[in-house]
Image: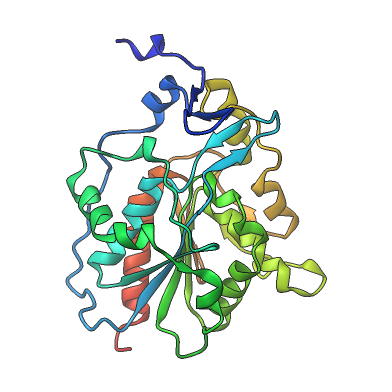
Amino acid sequence: MNTQDLSRQPRPDPAERDAFFPSPWSLSQFTSPTSNLSGADYADARRDGRWKILMIGADERYLPTANGHLFSTGNHPVETLLPMYHLDKAGFDFDVATLSGNAVKFEWWAFPGEDRDIGGLYERYQARFRQPKVLDDIVASLDAASDYAAIFIPGGHGALIGLPESRAVSKALHWAMAQQRYIITLCHGPAALLAARINEAGGDSLFRGYRICAFPDAMDRQTPDIGYMPGQLPWFFGEKLAQQGVQIVNEGIDGSVLQDRLLLTGDSPLAGNALGQLAARTLLDALAGR
């Protein structure tokens, strides 16, 4: 079938009233049965188990849109698993946490089902995705001796639900910056950076003056036209980050990544492989000898 013949109407999610998956046409354009995974060989990979990554996942499935419809979302599997793959190959283990301790939700409609490497990684971590730690419990014990080298917040529209208003996320971000640990995030994941203002005097941002790659608001505004989402977002995280002095440098998406001090970011699922490479290389170099 010619992809232009595919419907651009969002597809109903039978598990919830008035909830929708992306349209068949948008899935044909923006998902793939394989990923662009490459370059994940690290001769200097850690073998001592000294350092881990704290992944903060989305635990809510349905994102309300401005017209009342629900978008069936979660974390994007490519944005989650490609960076994880590189960091895993570089010798970093993961603790997985959500706000509630409920399972990490994935946009399974975007899973690269023919990608054996990514599928295998998911299988290895499935138990942690299904039974994550409670983020509040982790942040309560964070200190200078904590063995997290970085915090990883994957994308997917699920990152817009709860994370930007979370005190636990705020505490984790403040801890990372204070202890010179890295923050890795991409696409819609940088919405979680908004939480940093919660513990800032006057509501200012810990990240004022930072430059990042992220999914542009202008493109989010276009997604209902192709049926990717069933309605407009009620708010746009790029606008809110700009109000806090954070600059999104990309206008489109082409797989761009950017490091600004301790903050490593990517623009979309297209950036998953490059961000994984950047994160793995940066952490291996920074922690050499430690």
Residue 272 in the image: x percent, y percent? 37, 50
Q: Is residue 81 left or right of residue 166?
A: left
Q: Choose between 285 and 134: the one closer to the eye.
A: 134
Q: Up-down: is 121 above or below 270?
A: below
Q: Residue at x 76, y 67 (%)?
A: 204
Circle count = 0
Residue 106 in the image: x percent, y percent? 42, 46
Q: Up-down: is 272 above or below 11?
A: below
Q: Choose between 248 and 73: the one closer to the eye.
A: 73
User: Which color scheme is applied?
Assistant: rainbow
Q: Which of the 4 image quadrants contains residue 198?
A: bottom right
**Does residue 191 appear in this view?**
yes
**Does residue 188 appear in this view?**
no
Q: Quadrant of the C terminus?
A: bottom left
Q: Which of the 4 image quadrants contains residue 212?
A: bottom right
Q: Quadrant of the N terminus?
A: top left
Q: Residue at x 67, y 60 (%)?
A: 165
Q: Is residue 83 left or right of residue 161?
A: left
Q: Is residue 68 left or right of residue 189?
A: right
Q: Up-down: is 76 above or below 90?
A: above
Q: Up-down: is 54 above or below 35?
A: below
Q: Choose between 186 and 145: the one closer to the eye.
A: 145
Residue 58 in the image: x percent, y percent? 50, 54
Residue 123 in the image: x percent, y percent? 24, 54
